[in-house]
Amino acid sequence: MKIIQKVKNISVSSMIVSVILGVLFIIRPDVVLPCISLLVGSAVIIMGLTAIISYLRDKSSSFTLGLGVFSVILGIIICASLDAVVKFFVIFIGLYLLAAGIFNIITAIKIIAVSVFFGWVTLFLSIATSVMGVVCITQSSEVTNAVVQLVGISMIVYAVLDLVAFIQVKRLSKKVRDTVDIALADDEIETTGSVSDED
């Protein structure tokens, strides 16, 4: 049960983050990706400096020093090469959307057996998400505001898709629980009846 709860929490967090990033990408596409790149680069530099300081204090491992120096250099490269990082980021999001779309297509096929309407809605959104992922990957060499906005729309569609799948899985699990409870109750009645007959 704890694992299922963790998966639910991750799913909800993923939906919220996708919606927030999607809205930001649509509203300010020219600002958001460079800012994210700078934040990532700065974070890598800070991690590198932390590793270097840790080595200077303890002198425990030369690997820590090497990792720190590498992280600082990598962080500087990320901050200095924003265009390349933005293209890489768009490709990464495209791959993420493509994988999520394919996974949700499989989920949609299962949902159709339970709920035809929501199943077909999920299937349509899944295919749309996969197509948008492919577009993001193939158009990453020409990162324009339109492409970034497309990424934003894709992320919002993904969040909606994830929400629909989340609701359907919750309904399905509730039906399974109810069926099991009814079956257990029937077994108890039959067992009680058998005991009474023997008496």
Image (cartoon, helix red, strand yellow):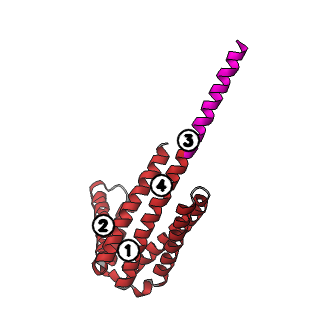
Residue 27, how many percent across, how many down?
Answer: 29, 76
Q: Which residues are magenta?
A: 175-199
Number of the label disc, if any, that sits on residue 177: 3
Label 3 Cα crowd, 10 Å radius (few <14 / some 14-19 / many 20+): few
Number of the label disc, if any, that sits on residue 152: 1
Label 1 vs 2, first from the N-terminus: 2
Front label number (2 vs 4): 4
Label 2 vs 4, first from the N-terminus: 2
Q: Are marks 1 and 2 in contact (CB under 8 Å)?
A: no
**Which of the pair 90/8 is nearer the observer?**
8
Residue 91, how many percent across, how many down?
Answer: 45, 77
Does 152 appear in magenta? no
The type of residue carrying mark 3 is Arg
The type of residue carrying mark 2 is Ala
Front label number (1 vs 2): 1
Residue under the point 67% across and 24% down: 191
Q: Are marks 1 and 3 in contact (CB under 8 Å)?
A: no
Quadrant of the frame with the C terminus? top right
Q: Is residue 54 left or right of residue 167?
A: left
Residue under the point 40% across and 82% down: 147
Q: Are marks 3 and 4 in contact (CB under 8 Å)?
A: no
Q: CA distance from mark 3 to mark 4?
A: 15 Å
Label 3 vs 4, first from the N-terminus: 4
Label 2 vs 3, first from the N-terminus: 2
Q: Is residue 107 left or right of residue 50?
A: right
Q: Return the residue found at the far bottom.
A: 142
Residue under the point 60% across and 31% down: 185
Q: CA distance from mark 1 to mark 2?
A: 23 Å
Residue corresponding to mark 4 = 167
The type of residue carrying mark 4 is Ile
Note whether 4 is above or below 79 in the view shown.
above
